[in-house]
Amino acid sequence: MKKTALAILLIFTVMLCCSCMSDTEKEKAMEDVRAAKPIIENYISENYSGAKLSTINYLAAKKDPGPVPDFGIYASGYCIAEIEYGNDDFNVIADTDSGECWDNYGTDSLENELKQKLSSMIEGAQPRSIDINISPCSLSSRISDSKQQGFYKIEDKNADAIIFGGNYDITAALKYDMPLSDISYDKLTSQTYKSSVTLQLLKFRDNSYAQKEILPRGESVIALSSEEQYLLLEESITFKTRRTESGSDDYVMELVSDSKYETAVVGDLTFAWKSNEITPDFTTTEAPDTMTTKYYSRKPFYKISDNAALMSYTMPDDITSTKLYCYCAEKYSDGYFIALPLVGDNDVANRFMLSKETAEINTNTARITSFSVKNEENQLYTMGIYQKSE
């Protein structure tokens, strides 16, 4: 009787979730569920004595984005089950072709162990907090990222097995409240890995941000826009593994970027830049009444802020150009950022855009634009906030 009730529940669950599928895909999903049921029952019997299968459902296949939207839903060959295990219910994902299973039992404690392992490989300081996302590589091309997050093979339920012996995608954001120059990375770069690992080490200007979660569940990049990174960070270092050679299962860790950021308030403008790419020197001056650029048919722009910024700068020889972000207050919502070089024609006439992220940080940074400068000797920019002529 119990088996009959469970079978009815499984069929109802699949029919409910398959309502947007074609008849062919619905049948495939049903076949997946029927095939997955004994696989999962055997898995929990061997590894979690006393556990019971509660519900099971198919998992939709991951679709590659293309020029033509595909709104269809397709069976993936994978199913997910809810498992009752005393007071600790969990989930199991099963591959109906290979019979392999992954589960998320004890994920929180395992992720804490992984955080401790990664922080121990970076000597000199402990991070204020760590955000981490881990998913099996074998699932990444088959089902959506959010569905595979936090699932592990039963034999990989320890940090060393996942990092050095497993086959996982690991992304971690380590947030520090001390200069990253005080940290040693020798242990990171002297290891051989079996998993693909990306580590982002971050030093915030305001240490309160080091306590906020910035790596959303299931994502492989931090949830900080470029304008937020320039404004909030003092330093950002990224390490990433690469295969030792094509086709190899071995990875080595490499430094892929090391960026330092600075900001300056000049009149009504706030600037942010990478200090290892440019050293600007700002002064405040009275804004010219009008400025004319090569854009907009060379029609003049009229000042709406009395202050202008003068910027001279130097850049390292190996940097050909770099980007600066420029922010201003909401009251200049109709304004344009105008920048004229002393020599050359690298004019800038950009409309300030609303930046919700930075507006939440500081109302004086609610509007934003960016511009690039070239590595040119004796260059000087005059920059201000203007409006277009009618």
Image: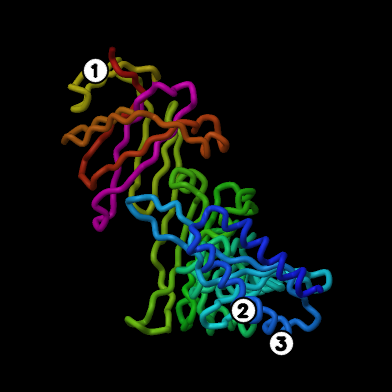
Question: Residue drawn 40% across and 21% down?
Answer: 334
Q: Amino acid at mark 2?
A: Ala
For disc 2, the neighbor class at 10 Å (few under 14, some 14 to 19, many from 20) is some
Which of discs 2 and 1 lies nearer the camera? The answer is: 2
Q: CA distance from mark 1 to mark 3?
A: 78 Å
Q: Nearer the viewer, residue 170 or 17?
A: 17
Residue where numbered disc 2 is placed: 159
Residue where numbered disc 3 is placed: 46
Q: Earlier in the sequence, mark 1 or mark 3?
A: 3
At mark 1, the secondary structure is: strand
Q: Position of residue 378 (x, y in %)?
A: 21, 40
361 shown above or below 137: above
The residue stretch that appears in magenta = 307-336
| Magenta residue check for 335 | yes
| Magenta residue check for 332 | yes
Q: Amino acid at mark 3?
A: Glu
Question: Residue drawn 56% across and 60% down?
Answer: 146
The number of discs equals 3
Q: Position of residue 200 (x, y in %)?
A: 50, 62
